[in-house]
Amino acid sequence: MRLLTLALLLLVVLVQGEIWLGKTGVPRVMALQAKLADQQAINSAARARNEQLAAEVRDLRDGLEMVEERARLELGMVKPDEILVQFTRPVAR
């Protein structure tokens, strides 16, 4: 009976050792959870960016307001019969 108790105790110690210190033990699970949290944050940011780009594509397909705004801001274009006035600050001497 004593030998059986000792064998079972040794078996419990080996199983616990594998759980806490083994390749698939607690440290590995914690590392994978950290990686998962990082990847979920990256995915969330990418999802937000994709939604923003999809909204821009819808705007470009549906109307010309976005095209006009981009042309004005990025290319400095003006409409016919429109006057563009630019002010510059004087250079301090």
Image: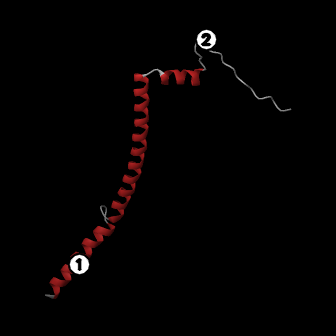
Please state which amino acid type lies under the numbered disc 1. Leu
Q: Secondary structure at mark 2?
A: loop
Circle nearer the N terminus (2, 1): 1
The x, y position of residue 35, in whole percent, is: 39, 53
The x, y position of residue 85, in whole percent, is: 69, 20
Q: Say which of marks 2 and 1 sits in front.
A: 2
Residue furthest out toward the top: 81
The x, y position of residue 92, in whole percent, is: 83, 32
Residue on which disc 1 sits: 10
User: Based on the displayed image, in which of its 4 quarters is residue 83 positioned?
Assistant: top right
User: Based on the displayed image, in which of its 4 quarters is residue 13 positioned?
Assistant: bottom left
Q: Secondary structure at mark 1?
A: helix
Which label sits on residue 69?
none
- Count of picture labels: 2
Residue furthest out toward the front: 81
Residue on which disc 2 sits: 81
User: Based on the displayed image, in which of its 4 quarters is residue 4 positioned?
Assistant: bottom left
**Residue that appears at 70% across and 22% down:** 86
Mark 1, Cα crowd under 10 Å, few <14 / some 14-19 / many 20+, is: few
The x, y position of residue 66, in whole percent, is: 48, 25
